[in-house]
């Protein structure tokens, strides 16, 4: 049997870039910056138990959430590395109130959105966390960038990906031609292709939702969660319930095994809690490219036109058939409420 050689992330990107005659190498430079940032964050995550980088930083981010020390460190790392790559004119981050416009790069063609450390509530308990990123093209590079350049619908993403820091460190990304996963080889400190052409099964056996909020869910979502837990041999139910509380970890598992992740609206959070620009668009692009579906319950996530940098939307994402059924039950209940009897 012929042994396939190691393909590093950088080699893979260069090979893909060679397929496009108009490629300038900009993506390679952006991904080198993201790769370096993720390695630095991974280093700090690995030594977190030995260094004074756990716990609260003592401030809150724009979301009103306590910032963890490692959140702030990760944000600084991504901002610095992306600012130096020369291809990024602006960076928006879940951890910052406003966009960062890179000095000296006013005419650079790309904007990057980041959640530098997703699932940070899990930092102190050594559970999986990660970094999320999206890359957008500017439509007009002749002028200085502004916030309006950053407020693009997800369908305009040029690339999207995430890095998960778990039992191994993986980088998963798409540029609109499928999804590929790379695992960090600690010995050579290179991300190596380990999961080529990732595809999410059309059906799955896992549902991921915070059932602690069950009573606050809309009726249709309650119906779907109860349906997942019913015993039915034909549909191989009940499904398994898995919820880590880290968006990356839950979706990464479902991407490989098949399943659905839900963060529905509630009375307290009618728009859900996940951020469109930093979490939902990225994951929607990846899951759709892997054959899955991502919906707000009313429309395709990547069709939502953002009105502000920190906009939130509900999220139903995962295996095509599971998401379709969840959304239909949600919508059916809404129709019944609107037209009782």
Image (cartoon, rainbow, N blue to C red):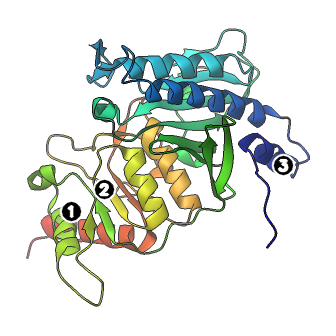
What is the C-alpha distance between the residues marked 2 and 1?
9 Å
| Residue situated in front as seen by the camera: 60 or 122 | 122
| Vertical position of residue 90 compared to residue 166: above or below | above
* Marked residue nearer the N-terminal end (2 or 3): 3
Asked if the residue under mark 1 is in contact with the one under mark 2, i.e. CB atoms within 8 Å, the reply is yes
Q: Secondary structure at mark 3?
A: helix
User: Distance of mark 2 from mark 3, alpha carbons?
Assistant: 36 Å
* Residue 50 drawn above or below residue 155: above
Q: Residues within 10 Å of mark 1 (few under 14, many from 20)?
A: many
Q: Position of residue 228 (x, y in %)?
A: 23, 72
Give the residue pinned by disc 2: 262
On screen, residue 176 above or below 131 = below
Residue indicated by mark 3 = 15
Q: Residue at x 34, y 72 (%)?
A: 205
Q: Position of residue 151 (x, y in %)?
A: 52, 33
Q: Quadrant of the C terminus?
A: bottom left
Residue 257: numbered disc? none
Q: How many marks?
A: 3
Q: Which residue is mark 1?
A: 221
The mark closer to the camera, 1 or 3, is 3
State the separation of the CA atoms marked 1 and 3: 44 Å
Q: Earlier along the polypeptide chain: callout 1 or callout 3? A: 3
């Amino acid at each position: 049997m012929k042994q396939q050689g190691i393909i590093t992330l950088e080699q893979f990107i260069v090979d893909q870039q060679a397929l496009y005659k108009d490629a300038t190498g900009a993506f390679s430079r952006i991904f080198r910056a993201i790769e370096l940032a993720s390695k630095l964050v991974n280093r700090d995550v690995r030594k977190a138990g030995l260094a004074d980088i756990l716990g609260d930083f003592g401030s809150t981010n724009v979301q009103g959430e306590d910032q963890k020390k490692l959140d702030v460190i990760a944000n600084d790392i991504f901002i610095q590395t992306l600012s130096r790559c020369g291809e990024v004119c602006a960076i928006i981050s879940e951890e910052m109130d406003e966009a960062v416009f890179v000095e000296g790069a006013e005419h650079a063609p790309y904007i990057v959105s980041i959640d530098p450390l997703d699932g940070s509530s899990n930092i102190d308990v050594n559970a999986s966390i990660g970094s999320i990123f999206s890359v957008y093209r500017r439509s007009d590079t002749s002028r200085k960038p502004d916030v309006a350049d950053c407020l693009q619908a997800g369908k305009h993403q040029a690339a999207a990906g995430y890095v998960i820091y778990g039992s191994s460190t993986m980088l998963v990304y798409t540029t609109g031609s499928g999804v590929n996963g790379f695992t960090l080889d600690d010995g050579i400190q290179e991300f190596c292709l380990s999961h080529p052409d990732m595809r999410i099964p059309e059906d799955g056996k896992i549902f991921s939702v915070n059932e602690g909020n069950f009573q606050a869910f809309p009726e249709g979502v309650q119906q779907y969660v109860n349906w997942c837990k019913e015993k039915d041999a034909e549909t191989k139910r009940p499904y398994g319930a898995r919820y880590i509380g880290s968006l990356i970890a839950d979706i990464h598992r479902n991407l490989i095994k098949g399943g659905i992740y839900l963060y529905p609206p509630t009375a307290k959070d009618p728009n859900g809690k996940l951020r469109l620009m930093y979490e939902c668009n990225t994951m929607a692009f990846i899951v759709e490219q892997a054959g899955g579906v991502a919906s707000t319950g009313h429309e395709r996530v990547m069709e939502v036109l953002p009105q502000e940098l920190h906009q939130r939307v509900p999220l139903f994402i995962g295996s095509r058939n599971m998401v379709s059924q969840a959304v239909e039950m949600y919508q059916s209940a809404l129709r019944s409420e609107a037209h009782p009897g």
